Image: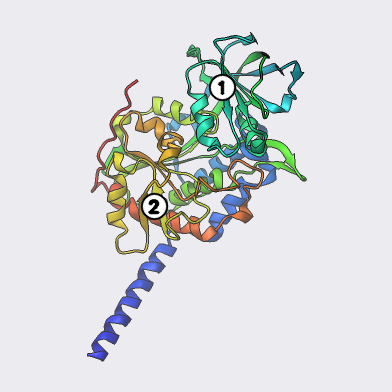
Amino acid sequence: MKVFKHCIWIAALLAGCTVRQAHDRIVDPSEVKRILTTLAADDMEGRAAFSPGIERAAQFIATEFKKIGLQPYPPQNGYRQTFRVSRISPATWEVTFDGTDIPDEHIIVSSNSPGVNWNNEPAVSLIQIQAGDDFAQRFRDASVGGKDAIVIIDTSFASLFERYRGFLMQGKINQLGQTPQPTPSVVYVLANQVPKSFRVSFTNKVEELSLSNLVGVLPGKSKPHEYVIFSAHYDHIGILQPIGQDSIANGADDDASGVSAVISLANYYKRLNNNERSLLFVAFTAEEIGLVGSQYFSKQIDADSVVAMINIEMIGKDAKFGPNSLYVTGYHQSDLARIMQQNVQQTAFTFHPDPYPTQNLFYRSDNASLAALGVPAHTFATVQIDQDRYYHSVADEVETLNIDNIVSSINAIAIGAKSIVAGKDTPTRVPKLER
C-alpha cells in the first residue's frame, strides 16, 4: 500500500511539473520585464495623453506588434487607430474664501462650460470632504452630483488632492464633431473650513488634438469574423508636482503591466498559430481622462461580432486572494470568468469576483465602453485598490512590482481563454447599458 501511494505521489509530482513547464513556455519573464521597463522609463514622461512621452510609447508598441507579426487593424491604417478630439481645459482660475485668495495649486476645475463667475451664488452647493472620510468615494459622489458645486477638501488629503489635480486639470475630451452635453461645473478646493462667502471664476480653452489607439490582429482560422479582444491602456497621468527629486508618474503598474501582458499574449498566440477566432490586441489611449480611446474604438467595430473582451489592468502585485489569483470586475454580468476558471482547473490559478464593489471598477476601465454595448467585457486585475499607496503617484515604479505575479497573471489569462480562442465556448452577453 505504501508503495502504491508513493507511486501516486510521484505521478502527481511529475504531472505538476509538466503543467508548470507548459505554463512557463507561455511567456518569457525577461521579455515581460523588458517591455515593462521600457514603457515605465523616465523618457516616456509618464505617458500622459497628448504628450511627447505617449507618442514614444505608441511607437514602441507598434514596433512590438510588427516584430511579432500581427496584422494591422484595419489593414490600411497601420497599427494606429488615430482620431481627432477637442479638449476643453482650464485657462484661468481664481477662488476667494472669506476675502482670502486660495493658492492656484489648491484648486481643481472640472467643467466643460466656457467659464463661470460665482459670487455667493445660492444655487452652488458647498460640499465638504472631512478628515477621515472615504476620499475616493466622496470625491466620486461630488463629481456626479448633477449640480454646480464647490467641494472643500480637508488638507489631510493634500497628497491625494495633488494626484487628482495632476490629471483632472488636463481637461475634458470630446470626439471631434460631437457637441458636448453641458455638465455642471465642480471646483475642488484644498481648505479646512467651509467659507461663509466665496468668489469663484474660471475660463476654459478649447483645442483640437489627435489621439491614437494601437491595434493588431491575428486572423481566425475558421471564424475570422468573430473577435476576442485582449486590451490594456498605455496612457498614464504624466508629470506631477515633484516629490523629492521625482516628478514623473511612470505608471509601471498602471498600466504598463497590462500592456506587457497584451504584447506577451500576442507573441504567445502568434507562436501557437491555431486560433479559430480572430484575436485583437489593443493598447488604448486616454483611459485616464475618461475612457476616450476605448469609446472611439467601440464605435469602429461591430459589437455583436466581439465574443469576449479581456481587459488587463494593474497586475503587478499580489491580489487580495494571494498569488496565482486575479479578480474580475463585473464577474456575474456574464459567464466569461466562469468559463476561464473551468479552463484553469488543473492549475493553481483562480479567478475571483471583484472584492471592491464600492469602487465601481466595472465602469472605471476600458472594458466599460464595450460592456455598455452588450459585449462580455471585463477587467482582470490584482491591484488592492483600497490600499495601494503607489496608485496615481510618482512612486508607481518597476521596482515596486512583482514580475512573477505579472507572469502568473499572463499564464492564467492565456490558459483561461483557451476554449474561447478555439471557438468552443462563447460567453453570455452583458446586458446593454440603457442610455
According to the image, what is the colour scheme of the structure?
rainbow
Give the residue at mark 2.
413
* Residue designated by label 1: 172
Rendered position, 432 above or below 384: above
Give the numbered dot on residue 242: none
Q: Which residue lies at the image location 50% right of the left edge and 44% below the top edge?
A: 65
The reply to whether the C-beta atoms of the residues labelled 2 and 1 are less than 8 Å apart is: no
Q: Is residue 146 left or right of residue 191?
A: left
Residue at image location 69% in from the left, 36% down from the top: 240
Relative to 298, does residue 352 appear above or below in the rendering?
below
Where residue 107 sits in the image (x, y, percent)? 67, 25
Q: Earlier in the sequence, mark 2 or mark 1?
A: 1
Q: Nearer the viewer, mark 2 or mark 1?
A: 1
Residue at image position (40%, 49%) is 327
Q: Where, by quadrant of the figure, is residue 191 drawn?
A: top right
Q: Is residue 211 visible?
A: yes
Identify the amino acid type marked 1: Lys
User: In the visual, does 335 lie left or right of 52?
Assistant: left
How far apart in space, not on screen, are marks 2 and 1 (Cα)? 33 Å
Q: Amino acid at mark 2?
A: Ile
- Kindly tell me whether residue 219 is visible in this rendering: no
Instruction: Give how far across and how far down residue 359 sits, in percent.
Output: 45, 38
Farthest residue in the front direction?
Answer: 196
In the picture provided, is 205 more to the left or to the right than 354?
A: right
x and y, in percent, of residue 43 in the image: 69, 42
Viewer-proximal residue among 305 and 367? 367
Q: Please tell me whether residue 120 is drawn above or below residue 83 in the rendered image.
A: above
**What residue is at 32 percent from the left and 34 percent from the top?**
375
Q: Quadrant of residue 6?
A: bottom left
Does dot 2 land on a helix, a strand or a loop? helix
